[in-house]
Image (tube, rainbow, N blue to C red):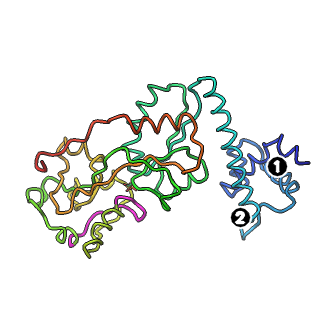
Protein backbone atom coordinates (compact mmCIF):
# COMPACT_ATOMS: atom_id res chain seq x y z
CA UNK A 1 0.00 0.00 0.00
CA UNK A 2 1.60 3.28 -1.07
CA UNK A 3 0.80 6.86 -0.04
CA UNK A 4 -1.72 7.17 -2.88
CA UNK A 5 -3.73 4.20 -1.61
CA UNK A 6 -3.81 5.80 1.81
CA UNK A 7 -5.32 8.92 0.33
CA UNK A 8 -7.64 7.26 -2.16
CA UNK A 9 -9.04 4.65 0.19
CA UNK A 10 -10.05 6.21 3.46
CA UNK A 11 -12.15 3.27 4.56
CA UNK A 12 -9.44 1.62 6.74
CA UNK A 13 -8.97 4.98 8.47
CA UNK A 14 -12.69 5.24 9.13
CA UNK A 15 -12.69 1.72 10.59
CA UNK A 16 -9.63 2.54 12.71
CA UNK A 17 -11.40 5.61 14.15
CA UNK A 18 -14.33 3.52 15.31
CA UNK A 19 -11.99 1.01 17.01
CA UNK A 20 -9.99 3.88 18.53
CA UNK A 21 -13.17 5.40 19.99
CA UNK A 22 -14.57 2.14 21.36
CA UNK A 23 -11.21 0.46 22.16
CA UNK A 24 -12.90 -2.81 21.32
CA UNK A 25 -12.64 -4.71 18.01
CA UNK A 26 -15.83 -6.71 18.33
CA UNK A 27 -17.99 -3.71 19.31
CA UNK A 28 -16.46 -1.79 16.39
CA UNK A 29 -17.41 -4.68 14.07
CA UNK A 30 -20.99 -4.56 15.38
CA UNK A 31 -21.24 -0.80 14.92
CA UNK A 32 -19.85 -0.99 11.39
CA UNK A 33 -21.89 -4.08 10.45
CA UNK A 34 -18.79 -5.97 9.25
CA UNK A 35 -16.97 -8.99 10.65
CA UNK A 36 -14.37 -8.71 13.37
CA UNK A 37 -11.74 -10.17 11.03
CA UNK A 38 -12.53 -7.45 8.47
CA UNK A 39 -11.97 -4.86 11.22
CA UNK A 40 -8.61 -6.46 12.10
CA UNK A 41 -7.60 -6.55 8.42
CA UNK A 42 -8.31 -2.84 7.99
CA UNK A 43 -6.34 -1.98 11.12
CA UNK A 44 -3.43 -4.22 10.01
CA UNK A 45 -3.44 -2.56 6.58
CA UNK A 46 -3.08 0.81 8.23
CA UNK A 47 -0.37 -0.44 10.59
CA UNK A 48 1.57 -1.83 7.61
CA UNK A 49 1.22 1.50 5.90
CA UNK A 50 2.38 3.66 8.80
CA UNK A 51 4.99 1.09 9.87
CA UNK A 52 4.18 1.14 13.60
CA UNK A 53 1.53 -0.53 15.77
CA UNK A 54 -1.57 1.55 16.44
CA UNK A 55 -2.93 -0.52 19.35
CA UNK A 56 -1.34 -2.53 22.13
CA UNK A 57 -2.79 -5.06 24.55
CA UNK A 58 -2.96 -4.18 28.27
CA UNK A 59 -4.30 -7.23 30.05
CA UNK A 60 -7.71 -7.87 28.57
CA UNK A 61 -7.99 -4.39 27.07
CA UNK A 62 -6.58 -2.70 24.00
CA UNK A 63 -5.22 0.82 24.19
CA UNK A 64 -3.94 3.23 21.57
CA UNK A 65 -0.18 3.54 21.14
CA UNK A 66 1.27 7.06 20.79
CA UNK A 67 1.15 6.60 17.02
CA UNK A 68 -2.49 5.46 17.32
CA UNK A 69 -3.39 8.55 19.35
CA UNK A 70 -1.73 10.78 16.77
CA UNK A 71 -3.46 9.02 13.87
CA UNK A 72 -6.80 9.34 15.69
CA UNK A 73 -6.30 13.09 15.94
CA UNK A 74 -5.36 13.44 12.26
CA UNK A 75 -8.11 11.04 11.18
CA UNK A 76 -10.79 13.07 12.98
CA UNK A 77 -9.49 16.23 11.39
CA UNK A 78 -9.43 14.62 7.92
CA UNK A 79 -13.08 13.51 8.14
CA UNK A 80 -14.25 16.74 9.64
CA UNK A 81 -12.47 18.61 6.83
CA UNK A 82 -14.18 16.40 4.25
CA UNK A 83 -17.51 17.25 5.88
CA UNK A 84 -16.66 20.92 5.88
CA UNK A 85 -15.59 20.73 2.22
CA UNK A 86 -18.90 19.18 1.18
CA UNK A 87 -20.87 21.70 3.18
CA UNK A 88 -18.85 24.64 1.86
CA UNK A 89 -19.35 23.42 -1.72
CA UNK A 90 -23.03 23.05 -1.01
CA UNK A 91 -23.29 26.57 0.34
CA UNK A 92 -21.62 27.85 -2.86
CA UNK A 93 -24.62 26.44 -4.69
CA UNK A 94 -26.87 28.33 -2.31
CA UNK A 95 -28.12 25.06 -0.82
CA UNK A 96 -29.38 24.81 2.71
CA UNK A 97 -28.87 21.16 3.45
CA UNK A 98 -26.03 19.68 5.43
CA UNK A 99 -25.46 18.68 9.02
CA UNK A 100 -25.75 20.64 12.23
CA UNK A 101 -24.07 18.90 15.15
CA UNK A 102 -24.74 20.65 18.44
CA UNK A 103 -23.41 19.66 21.86
CA UNK A 104 -24.91 21.08 25.03
CA UNK A 105 -24.45 20.70 28.76
CA UNK A 106 -27.20 18.92 30.65
CA UNK A 107 -29.27 21.97 31.62
CA UNK A 108 -28.95 23.79 28.29
CA UNK A 109 -29.47 20.59 26.29
CA UNK A 110 -32.83 19.87 27.86
CA UNK A 111 -34.22 23.31 28.74
CA UNK A 112 -32.68 25.82 26.32
CA UNK A 113 -31.51 24.35 23.02
CA UNK A 114 -34.65 22.45 21.87
CA UNK A 115 -36.70 25.67 21.63
CA UNK A 116 -34.05 27.24 19.38
CA UNK A 117 -33.74 24.07 17.31
CA UNK A 118 -37.50 24.31 16.72
CA UNK A 119 -37.06 27.78 15.20
CA UNK A 120 -33.98 26.63 13.25
CA UNK A 121 -35.85 23.64 11.86
CA UNK A 122 -38.61 25.84 10.48
CA UNK A 123 -36.08 27.98 8.63
CA UNK A 124 -33.82 25.14 7.44
CA UNK A 125 -35.97 22.01 7.16
CA UNK A 126 -33.41 20.07 5.09
CA UNK A 127 -30.51 20.30 7.53
CA UNK A 128 -29.95 17.07 9.50
CA UNK A 129 -29.72 18.03 13.17
CA UNK A 130 -28.08 16.15 16.01
CA UNK A 131 -27.99 17.31 19.62
CA UNK A 132 -25.64 15.63 22.06
CA UNK A 133 -26.52 16.31 25.70
CA UNK A 134 -23.51 15.53 27.88
CA UNK A 135 -21.67 16.94 30.87
CA UNK A 136 -19.50 20.02 30.66
CA UNK A 137 -16.17 18.31 30.09
CA UNK A 138 -17.61 16.09 27.36
CA UNK A 139 -19.01 19.16 25.58
CA UNK A 140 -15.52 20.64 25.50
CA UNK A 141 -14.06 17.32 24.30
CA UNK A 142 -16.65 17.06 21.50
CA UNK A 143 -15.71 20.51 20.23
CA UNK A 144 -11.99 19.75 20.48
CA UNK A 145 -12.39 16.48 18.56
CA UNK A 146 -14.70 18.23 16.10
CA UNK A 147 -17.48 15.76 16.82
CA UNK A 148 -19.72 18.79 17.38
CA UNK A 149 -19.68 21.97 15.29
CA UNK A 150 -20.98 24.25 17.97
CA UNK A 151 -22.03 24.06 21.61
CA UNK A 152 -24.29 25.73 24.14
CA UNK A 153 -23.08 25.91 27.71
CA UNK A 154 -23.42 27.83 30.95
CA UNK A 155 -19.77 28.73 31.28
CA UNK A 156 -16.92 29.58 28.91
CA UNK A 157 -14.38 26.71 28.83
CA UNK A 158 -10.75 27.24 29.82
CA UNK A 159 -8.58 28.81 28.63
CA UNK A 160 -11.07 31.45 27.42
CA UNK A 161 -8.74 32.73 24.68
CA UNK A 162 -9.04 29.39 22.82
CA UNK A 163 -12.79 29.79 22.43
CA UNK A 164 -15.21 32.01 20.63
CA UNK A 165 -17.98 32.30 23.25
CA UNK A 166 -20.90 34.73 23.07
CA UNK A 167 -23.63 35.07 25.70
CA UNK A 168 -27.10 34.95 24.16
CA UNK A 169 -29.56 34.30 27.00
CA UNK A 170 -29.80 35.09 30.72
CA UNK A 171 -29.50 32.24 33.14
CA UNK A 172 -30.57 32.93 36.71
CA UNK A 173 -29.96 30.40 39.44
CA UNK A 174 -32.52 30.45 42.23
CA UNK A 175 -33.10 28.63 45.51
CA UNK A 176 -36.17 26.38 45.42
CA UNK A 177 -38.27 24.64 48.04
CA UNK A 178 -41.69 23.00 48.23
CA UNK A 179 -44.63 25.38 48.89
CA UNK A 180 -45.06 23.97 52.44
CA UNK A 181 -41.47 24.74 53.43
CA UNK A 182 -41.25 27.19 56.40
CA UNK A 183 -38.95 29.45 54.36
CA UNK A 184 -41.53 29.80 51.58
CA UNK A 185 -43.07 32.86 53.27
CA UNK A 186 -39.85 34.38 54.66
CA UNK A 187 -38.01 37.38 53.17
CA UNK A 188 -34.28 38.09 52.86
CA UNK A 189 -33.09 34.77 54.25
CA UNK A 190 -29.38 35.11 55.09
CA UNK A 191 -26.89 33.29 52.89
CA UNK A 192 -25.28 31.89 56.04
CA UNK A 193 -28.58 30.16 56.90
CA UNK A 194 -28.64 28.56 53.46
CA UNK A 195 -25.02 27.39 53.84
CA UNK A 196 -25.89 25.83 57.21
CA UNK A 197 -28.81 23.92 55.69
CA UNK A 198 -27.96 20.57 54.05
CA UNK A 199 -28.93 20.97 50.38
CA UNK A 200 -29.82 18.69 47.48
CA UNK A 201 -27.02 19.29 44.99
CA UNK A 202 -26.06 18.20 41.48
CA UNK A 203 -23.10 15.92 40.76
CA UNK A 204 -19.49 17.28 40.85
CA UNK A 205 -18.76 18.81 37.44
CA UNK A 206 -22.19 20.43 37.18
CA UNK A 207 -22.01 24.12 36.26
CA UNK A 208 -24.96 24.89 38.56
CA UNK A 209 -23.17 23.32 41.51
CA UNK A 210 -19.94 25.14 40.69
CA UNK A 211 -21.73 28.52 40.59
CA UNK A 212 -23.25 27.87 44.03
CA UNK A 213 -19.89 26.79 45.45
CA UNK A 214 -18.29 29.97 44.06
CA UNK A 215 -20.94 32.20 45.64
CA UNK A 216 -20.45 30.59 49.06
CA UNK A 217 -16.69 30.52 48.69
CA UNK A 218 -16.53 34.27 48.00
CA UNK A 219 -17.99 34.96 51.47
CA UNK A 220 -16.03 32.25 53.28
CA UNK A 221 -18.91 29.75 53.51
CA UNK A 222 -19.02 26.20 52.21
CA UNK A 223 -21.59 23.84 50.83
CA UNK A 224 -23.44 21.54 53.18
CA UNK A 225 -24.63 18.51 51.18
CA UNK A 226 -27.68 16.46 52.14
CA UNK A 227 -27.88 14.46 48.92
CA UNK A 228 -26.14 14.42 45.56
CA UNK A 229 -28.55 13.91 42.65
CA UNK A 230 -27.42 13.50 39.08
CA UNK A 231 -30.05 15.43 37.13
CA UNK A 232 -32.24 18.52 37.24
CA UNK A 233 -35.41 16.41 37.02
CA UNK A 234 -34.42 14.35 40.05
CA UNK A 235 -33.64 17.52 41.97
CA UNK A 236 -37.04 19.00 41.10
CA UNK A 237 -38.88 15.84 42.11
CA UNK A 238 -36.96 15.53 45.38
CA UNK A 239 -37.56 19.18 46.32
CA UNK A 240 -41.25 19.06 45.46
CA UNK A 241 -41.61 15.99 47.68
CA UNK A 242 -40.16 17.91 50.59
CA UNK A 243 -36.73 16.27 50.71
CA UNK A 244 -34.95 19.60 51.01
CA UNK A 245 -33.86 22.77 49.23
CA UNK A 246 -31.77 23.15 46.08
CA UNK A 247 -30.30 25.70 43.70
CA UNK A 248 -31.36 25.42 40.08
CA UNK A 249 -31.69 27.44 36.88
CA UNK A 250 -35.01 29.28 36.71
CA UNK A 251 -35.49 27.99 33.13
CA UNK A 252 -35.75 24.46 34.50
CA UNK A 253 -38.72 25.10 36.79
CA UNK A 254 -41.19 27.13 34.71
CA UNK A 255 -43.84 24.42 34.69
CA UNK A 256 -43.44 23.53 38.38
CA UNK A 257 -43.75 27.22 39.36
CA UNK A 258 -46.97 27.67 37.44
CA UNK A 259 -48.34 24.40 38.84
CA UNK A 260 -47.30 25.60 42.33
CA UNK A 261 -45.30 22.46 43.00
CA UNK A 262 -42.19 24.51 43.76
CA UNK A 263 -41.51 28.01 45.07
CA UNK A 264 -38.53 30.32 44.66
CA UNK A 265 -37.10 31.36 48.03
CA UNK A 266 -35.92 34.88 48.78
CA UNK A 267 -32.30 34.23 49.79
CA UNK A 268 -29.58 36.88 50.02
CA UNK A 269 -27.17 36.70 47.02
CA UNK A 270 -29.82 35.19 44.74
CA UNK A 271 -30.60 34.98 41.93
CA UNK A 272 -27.06 34.20 40.77
CA UNK A 273 -26.92 35.93 37.41
CA UNK A 274 -25.25 33.92 34.68
CA UNK A 275 -25.68 33.48 30.93
CA UNK A 276 -25.89 30.78 28.31
CA UNK A 277 -23.08 30.93 25.77
CA UNK A 278 -22.81 29.73 22.21
CA UNK A 279 -19.30 28.36 21.88
CA UNK A 280 -16.91 27.06 19.25
CA UNK A 281 -13.15 26.72 18.96
CA UNK A 282 -11.66 30.14 18.22
CA UNK A 283 -9.88 29.08 15.04
CA UNK A 284 -12.20 26.37 13.77
CA UNK A 285 -14.09 26.63 10.51
CA UNK A 286 -17.82 27.03 11.11
CA UNK A 287 -19.98 25.12 8.65
CA UNK A 288 -22.82 27.13 7.09
CA UNK A 289 -25.48 25.37 9.27
CA UNK A 290 -23.43 26.07 12.41
CA UNK A 291 -23.05 29.72 11.38
CA UNK A 292 -26.80 30.00 10.78
CA UNK A 293 -27.58 28.38 14.13
CA UNK A 294 -25.16 30.69 15.97
CA UNK A 295 -26.72 33.69 14.27
CA UNK A 296 -30.18 32.48 15.26
CA UNK A 297 -29.17 32.06 18.93
CA UNK A 298 -27.76 35.58 18.95
CA UNK A 299 -30.84 37.18 17.43
CA UNK A 300 -33.98 35.23 18.31
CA UNK A 301 -35.69 36.31 21.54
CA UNK A 302 -37.36 33.56 23.53
CA UNK A 303 -40.17 34.19 25.97
CA UNK A 304 -38.73 34.85 29.44
CA UNK A 305 -39.68 32.40 32.21
CA UNK A 306 -42.27 33.79 34.59
CA UNK A 307 -41.04 35.40 37.79
CA UNK A 308 -43.24 34.71 40.83
CA UNK A 309 -44.99 37.78 42.28
CA UNK A 310 -43.26 37.32 45.66
CA UNK A 311 -39.93 38.26 44.10
CA UNK A 312 -41.02 41.37 42.19
P1 LIG B 1 -25.23 21.96 34.55
O1 LIG B 1 -25.49 23.34 33.82
O2 LIG B 1 -25.36 22.27 36.00
O3 LIG B 1 -26.33 21.12 34.01
O4 LIG B 1 -23.82 21.47 34.23
C1 LIG B 1 -24.55 24.02 33.14
C2 LIG B 1 -24.29 25.36 33.72
O5 LIG B 1 -25.25 26.00 34.17
O6 LIG B 1 -23.10 25.77 33.73
Element at badge 2?
strand
- The residue sitting at 59% across, 24% down in the picture is 95
- The residue sitting at 54% across, 37% down in the picture is 100
User: Eyeballing the image, is 143 above or below 97?
Assistant: below
Left or right of residue 166, residue 50 in this image: right
Asked whether 9 or 15 is in front, the reply is 9
Answer whether residue 1 is visible to the viewer in this image.
Answer: no
User: Eyeballing the image, is 66 above or below 140?
Assistant: below
- Which circle's residue, 2 or 1, is located before the other in the chain? 1
- The residue sitting at 46% across, 55% down in the picture is 135
Left or right of residue 92, residue 132 in this image: left
Q: Residue furthest right?
A: 1
Tally of marks = 2
Q: Position of residue 145 (x, y in %)?
A: 61, 52
Find the distance from the CA under tag 2 to the CA under tag 1: 17 Å
* Label placed on residue 108: none
Answer whether residue 303 is visible to the viewer in this image.
Answer: yes
Image: magenta residue range = 196-208
* Label placed on residue 42: 1
Instruction: Identify the image quadrant of residue 200.
Output: bottom left
Q: Position of residue 302 (x, y in %)?
A: 31, 36
Element at badge 1?
helix
Left or right of residue 182, residue 225 in this image: right
Left or right of residue 79, residue 203 in this image: left
Q: Which residue is mark 2?
A: 63
The quadrant where ligand 1 appears is bottom left
Instruction: Identify the image quadrant of residue 207.
Output: bottom left
In magenta segment, residue 207: yes
- The residue sitting at 22% across, 53% down in the picture is 240
Q: Is the CB atom of the residue marked by disc 1 within 8 angstroms of ligand 1's nearest atom?
A: no
In magenta segment, residue 49: no
Amino acid sequence: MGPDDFLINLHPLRVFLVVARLLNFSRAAEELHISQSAVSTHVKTLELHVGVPLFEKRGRHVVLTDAGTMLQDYGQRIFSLIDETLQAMNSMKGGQWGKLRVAADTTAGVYVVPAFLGVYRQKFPDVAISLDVVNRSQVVESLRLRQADIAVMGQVPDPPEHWDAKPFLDNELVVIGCPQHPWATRHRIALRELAETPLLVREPGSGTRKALERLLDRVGLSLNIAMELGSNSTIKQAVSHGLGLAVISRRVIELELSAERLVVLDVEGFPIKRAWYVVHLEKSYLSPPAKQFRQLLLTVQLKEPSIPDSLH
